Structure formats: structure tokens, C-alpha cells
Image (cartoon, rainbow, N blue to C red):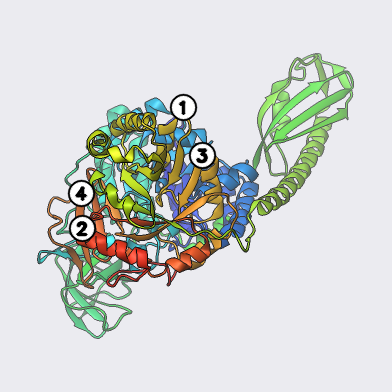
Amino acid sequence: MKPQQNRPELLAPAGSTESFFAAMEAGADAVYCGLHDFSARAKARNFGLGDIEKVLAWARSHDRRLYVTLNTLVKESELPQLVETLAALEATDVDGVIIQDLAVWRLARDHFPGLDLHSSTQMTVHNSAGVLQLERMGIKRAVLARELTIEEIRHIRAHTSIELEHFVHGALCFSFSGQCSFSSFLGGKSGNRGRCAPPCRRRYRYRNKEGYYFSPNDLSAIDLLDELEQAGVGSFKIEGRMKSAEYVHQVVGAYRQVLDAAPQDKRTALRTAKERLKNSFGRQPTRGFLGEARPTDLVTPNRKGSTGRFLGEVTRIRGTDISFKTGDRLHLGDRLRIQPKTDKAGSAFTIKTLRQGKNKVRKVDPGAQVTVPSPYRDIFQPGDAVFKVSSDQAFTLSEAACRRRLGQASRLIRKVDLHIGLTEDELLVRGEVAGLSLERRYPVTTEAAASSPLDAGTLRGVFSRSGDQPLALDRLETGELPAVVIAPSRLKEIRRSFYQDLAAALGTQISTRRREHLEQARQALLARVEGLPDRSPGVTVAVRDLRDTHVLRRPGVNRLVLPLTGANVQGLSRQGRHLSSRPGQVVWDIPFVQFDTDWTEARKMVQYLVSQGFRTFRLNNIGHFPLFDNLENVRLLTGYRLFSLNSQAMLAWKELGVEEVTLYLEDDRENLTQILCRPTGLRTAVTAYAPVPVMISRIALRSVKPDAPVVSDRGEGYRVGKRDGLTVVTPETDFSLLGRLDELEEMGCSQVVVDLAHCGAFSAKGKKVMDATERNHALPGTTLFNFDHGIE
């Protein structure tokens, strides 16, 4: 099926070769896939660089596009591998690279200009200022946060010009993408490193009531496509690189059906597409935030947070045999997942034997009591849930068959623009392809034309054939041609000779450029420098409001972080007069989420504070940079939400005007040591104490209050609170490196940050933390997070 042109792109996930072909056959305009490294879906099968060349060749031969995800945070030691990958992708000529870490942006911009960059939704771009900043940075496309309404997207489109992409279907995260550290907090498996072990899908207990409080339903915006197109979205993205080829085929096919339907057939197409989506084995559908900023159907706590069609509960276990009453039709070859009543992960298997009573059968109808053998023993119990997660009735092309099909794909074909001119005895041919220009002159014998003189149509007919060269004619210009003819055999000789020369020159250029760009990028990586200047780190204390600003009088405290709120700014004239004499010690912290309705007020507050002599601000989102347009002598710092996990990202922030970065909260000792010995010229801050907001969400949990913790089956407690209109989930165990400050000093950090905004600097807890900071004593009952055991 060939997609319609001049409509929004339908962009499908490809976590495997089977999913790639499923998407192609169902009508996707483009696919996005990950490599074995630097992919936010590290658990997907993903692709090697050799696979990418074949997949791209197949896609291009069918007029489709391929985007590659490099949308994870990169450790310092991984930078050499990153530049190798970027060099290979530029040589391959993929249609775009989806990024999160600004190290990728900086290296690609400086050394691999052939790559078009798209910002990942992991960058939490959620307002027009964020998209504008990406536009200034040369990013071609912004993948917007999934927390936006259609009206908010419309506002972004009205104030920016780069391409906009938005998810229309698939799994949703409870937290803003890129801002979840839940999985990392539990065991170092960072979602920002592609290794999320989704704790949001687990069952929790709140006041003795169990529920799936953090498990969102699945986005399904199939009936909002026209509105999204009118709002300015140019690419409709389907989530699912961890999903089966069958899922991809069903979902892409449903969306293709609606996009291609004529206006008078739209209602019927929607109805049949929604029926098709029921067979995709997703969760309960929701429009997410697209319809309204306060949807009520995003989380259903009494519904299991699992994909698949719920069939029933296990009634009996005998050895490896599992018995249950099925709520849906079953066939041999269907795939089941048994989900324990605990919060442990489920186990899946394919039905190879199906029994009804004592009889082996090939299929059963809903309501039948069935028994199926599983490959597992002693891990299931009566009462565990049974889900059907795929069927043998849909896309069934095997991995081996897909590999064979890829192997049959031709080489990557590159489009050529030709200009052909003719003198009395020479044919001038100039070709341009992939930035290469080649010109050749060929002697010819011409004769006056009695009829059908040489023209652009004749030349296009000849040069449209490229033989065994990986080239295809795109545009052809001739200028004015005399009324002559040239022997067809001579034109064919010229075509063969020119395309052979052009292909050889192109191959040489690609190889040379790859080698040169790679070497330049390697040289740009910062070497380790031993013996950087010794510095005793200062202490920065983050507080909630002006009542705690007297913490500046504590020994060793040289700086204060205040939230940029209306109450704090307005209170300066009453409570903050003592700060006016020391504005250099005050850092104004900008809330990382600011929808467009909030941004103008934030800009006014920043301008007012600058007029009052306050110059230092901490930024927490890419959309904060435009707040400081046309303001002079301001000092910009980054919070840990503007990720700095490597020296190249730090240099990127420096180029954007930053003087000091706060290193990533999830980071470990080894990587911190690697970063801090690089001569970036930036001051560095490391968080030494803080509660860890493992999730920040626009989803309102009406059934959960901060008066009691939400508790997992493992006994871990989490508080669910509100901050700036957002839901914040925080573990009861705080993060602390107190007692290890000497190590941070040896590493060379400039500031340690102590965050007391949750409790107050002069509360009993706040005083205890400050005492421990001054004495460098460990705080009992806290966690080192990933500092010792590492981040994956």
C-alpha cells in the first residue's frame, strides 16, 4: 500500500525486522528504530549498523523514510563509541537521528553535518519557547511531550516553524518522559539509558486499598487525527518498539485506513479501524491530554497495568499445566502471559497444546474451561491473571523470512540531479548527488534533426536508467538545446561512463568524509587532565520560600536557591530585604514545567529580578533559555534535569551561555570522576542531599493524598504530593552523599547542593541535615542512589 502524499507522516515503531516489514506492509510512511546501543528501548531486539543500511535501502526503494534513535544519555566513557556511530549513520544517509543528550547535538552539528536531528520526547519539550530554542539550535523536528492538549500544540505551531511530531497511539508514561528516575532509584536501571524496568506498572497499596495507581492506559487518538493535522502536527507517531510485529501491523493498518479515507467515508473507516485496534492487545484506550488538560481516564487503579486481552484467572496448577476459564477465543499458536498477583513481571509463552477436558483441540470459544502446558514450573499460583498478548491470525512473517527479504534489497539508491548542455561537438554533463558535484565533457557527432530533435524528454529517457550503479535520476535541466540528434548508442555510452564515474567519486567521497569527520570528532573529545586546581566546594542550599533564607548565615553556606514563584518574588519587598545586599548569593530556580500560559509571567518575573540586581538563575528545561533574550549580565546555571552525563553535553551548555552545571542526580562515582577530570571550563555542582522525585506528572491522582504513603509489595513507601499543579511521587527514603563530601572534593566539584525545599531549613529534619553537612557525617536511613553500585 502506497501512502498518500501531502498528508501528515504516519511514523511506526520497528524494534525488529519483523516489525519493520509489518509497518511497511500496513502502510507506514516512515519507521523509527534503535541500534544495539544508545537506544531508549535497549530491551528491544534493535538493529546493527549493517542492518540499518539494508533497512534504509529497502525503505528508500519504496519511497519511505527511516529515522534512527540515539535518544539516551551517554556516559563519558561511551563518547568514542558515540562518534563512531554518528560517522556510520552520516555515511549511511539516514533520514534523521532522534536525540536526547546534547552531546549528540554538539558532535553532530560540528562534525557530522549530513545528519538531520530530531529532538526526542525525552527532552520534555512542552511549550513554544522550547521548540523555538530547538529551532535556534538547528534541530529539524521537535517530538513534543505527550502532556499537551491540541490547543497547546496549536499555540506552539503558531509561534514556531520547525517540523512537529506527536504520539498518537501506544503506551504512556506516568511521568513526563525524560524526567522519571523510578526504575533507576530501585536498582540503577535508568529509563534515560534505555533500561527502564517499569515500576509504574506494579501494584501498590494505599491505606489498605490495592491498585495500579501509576499505570496509565494506552493513548489512542485515532479520532483526533484531523484536529491534530489542523493544529500543525506533521508526523503522527505510534509507540511500540517493544511490541510484536502483529501489534505494529494492526495499529499501523488502522491509522492508515483512517488517514486514507475520503471525507464521506471517514465515519465508517473510524468504526472499522477501532474494531481493528481491539485486536492489537493494548491497554484500555484514552485520548490522553489531547482533549483536555485534566483527563479523568488516564489511570484506572482497579485495572491491571498490563497489555493484552484479559482472559481470566488461573483456577488450577498441576505441574506445568495451567487451567483457566477463557473469556475470549483461543487458538493453537496464540501467545499468553501469566501475570502474578504480586508486582513481579509476568511470564509469556506460546500455546503449543490446547486441551478442553481430556481432548486436544485446535481452538476453543469464549467461556470454555481450558488447560495449557507452560514451559515454567512453580512460579504461578491460582488467582494469577491470564492475558492473550498475540494471536496466530495476523502478521506472521518470520524473522528468517524478513532477513531473506532484506538480503534481497538492492543497495541504497541515491538521487542525482543532472544538468546537460550541448555545444557543436561536446555534450556537457554535470551531476550533483549527496553534496558531490561532478562534471564531464564528451565528444559527440550531431546531425540536423529532420524530426524529433534532442530534448529534455529524450535525455530523461536515457539517463533514467543507471544500470548497476546505485543512482537514480531526480531533476534534469538542459537549458536551450539546438535542433539536432545524437545517436542513441552514443548517449547510452555517455550515460554508462558518467554514472560509473559519478558512483566511484561518490563512494570515494563518502569514505573520505567518514574518515575525516570521525577523526575530527575524536580530536574534539576532551582528554583526561590530572591535577586540576584544588577547590574546596561551596555549599548551596535549596529552600522553599523566603522564610528559610537566613540559612545563608550557617557556616559554609555560600549560596541559596529559591524557586521562581510569584509568592517569592512578591515577598521580596517585605521578607527578603536582607537579600538585596547579597544578590550574588541568590539563585532563582525556574520550575522545569512551564506551559505557554505560564511562560509570559515567568519572563516578567525574570525581568523584574534582573532590574533589582539579581543575576543568577538555574534553568531546568531547554525552553528556559528564551526567558533571557535581550537580558545582559545574567549568570545561567543548569539544574540536573538539563542532563550533564558527559563533557560534550557540558560544552554544549557552555555554548548556550551556561557558567555552571549540576551533574545528573542518577550518576555514579565512576562516571562523575570521569567528567570532573575534563577541562570544560565550567563550574560543577553535585547534589549531596535531596528527596528524589522519581516521577513528576501532569496526571492528577484524585484517590491518593499525601497523608499516607503508597506502598509496594516489597514494602517501599512513596509519597504522592502536589507541586505547581503537578503530581510528584517521592520515595520516603532520601538521597544523601553526606559523609562522602571528601570524595566529591577530591573529584573536583565546585559546589555541593543540599535540597531542603521539602522540609524547611529550620525544621528539625532541616537542622539535622545541615549539621550533617557541616560535619560531613552520614545520615542514617538514606540511600546513596547509584553512587556506589552504578547506573546502567
Type of the residue with mark 1: Asn
Label placed on residue 657: 3
Q: To which residue does mark 1 refer? A: 630
Q: Earlier in the sequence, mark 2 or mark 1?
A: 1
Q: Secondary structure at mark 4?
A: strand
Residue depicted at 74% across the width and 25% down the height: 419
- Image quadrant assignment for residue 496: top right
How far apart, in angstroms, are the residues tagged by discs 2 and 3?
Answer: 36 Å
Q: Earlier in the sequence, mark 2 or mark 3?
A: 3
Q: Residues within 10 Å of mark 4 (few under 14, many from 20)?
A: some
Q: Residues within 10 Å of mark 3 (few under 14, many from 20)?
A: some
- Image quadrant assignment for residue 193: bottom left
Q: Is residue 790 above or below residue 535?
A: below
Q: Earlier in the sequence, mark 4 or mark 3?
A: 3
Between 303 and 454, the one lying in front of the other is: 303
Between 591 and 689, the one lying in front of the other is: 689
Q: To which residue does mark 2 refer? A: 763
Type of the residue with mark 3: Gly
Q: Secondary structure at mark 2?
A: loop
Label placed on residue 722: 4
Q: Residues within 10 Å of mark 1 (few under 14, many from 20)?
A: few
Residue depicted at 46% across the width and 58% down the height: 537
Tag 2 near tag 3, CB within 8 Å:
no
Q: Earlier in the sequence, mark 2 or mark 4?
A: 4
Lateral position of residue 712 relative to residue 468, left or right:
left
How far apart, in angstroms, are the residues tagged by discs 2 and 1?
Answer: 40 Å
